[in-house]
Amino acid sequence: MTETNDHPTLPGFTRHRPFALILLVTGMVGWVASGILVLERLALYEDAEHVTTCDLNALVSCGKVMGTWQSELFGFPNPLIGIVAFAVVITTAMAMLSGARFADWYWGGLQAGVTVGLLFIIWLWYQALFVIHILCLYCMVVCAMMIPLFILLTVRNLAHGLFPASPAVVRFASQWAGTLIAVVYVAVAASVFLSFYSDFTSL
């Protein structure tokens, strides 16, 4: 089934133009953050003594994170994945704003890609907090964009019938999507506090 005109009962943010703007904002912010990380990584390749723009202290340092094997899990800098992935999100948004409508298979593929991306981000977040024990500021920006992108895309696909769900489930998901995003953000902040509790208390 191909996406058609929005039904008036669809939640506001799941409609064509509002959702295109959501994709555009999350995609642009995530792409810029990924791009900065790539530039900083290239600068470190050229000069091992380079101080990255987010080397704030011993706990927040992109440069130190980039020196770990986790930052190049597939043999190249992880942010290169972000540049490509967020470019797809931005392209989708721009096409939608130009009037394009996508088939269900496309939305299913986007959902799969964003889901895999979120799982990768979760793994990287765990590594940063509990293994490396250093935060990367721009990585946190990417994480902050992936959370609403995943949740709102999932709700959008539920509302458009891509996944089987009752009207009650769709209504609940739509009404509480913003709250769920806020709860996840609080959980992320709590994980930082838990991991760095001894560092905070020793200040």
Image (cartoon, rainbow, N blue to C red):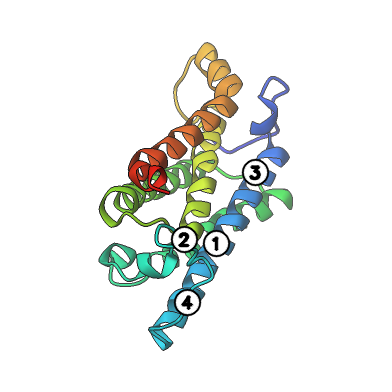
Q: Mark 3 is on which residue type?
A: Ile
Q: Nearer the viewer, mark 4 or mark 2?
A: 4
* Nearer-N-terminus badge (4/1): 1
Tell which circle, 2 or 1, labels the residue nearer the N-terminal end: 1
| Cα–Cα span, label 3 and label 2 | 17 Å
Query: Regarding mark 2 in the picture, which secondary structure is present there?
Result: helix
**Disc 4 to disc 1, how far (Cα)?**
17 Å
**Disc 3 from disc 1: Cα separation:** 17 Å
Point out which mark residue 82 bears.
2
Are discs 3 and 2 less than 8 Å apart at CB?
A: no
Question: Residue at left 39%, top 50%?
Answer: 121
Contact (Cβ within 8 Å) of mark 2 with mark 1: yes
When asked about the image quadrant of residue 28, the answer is bottom right
> Measured from the top left, where is residue 45 in percent x and y?
39, 83
- Residue at which label 3 appears: 22
Identify the mark nearer the N-term, 3 or 2.
3
Mark 4 and 2 residues: CB-CB less than 8 Å, in contact? no
Mark closer to the chain start, 3 or 4: 3
- Looking at this rendering, what residue extends furthest in the top direction? 168
Task: Tell us which disc is closer to us: 4 or 1.
Answer: 4
Which badge, 4 or 2, is on the more N-terminal residue? 4
Residue 141 % position (x, y): 53, 53
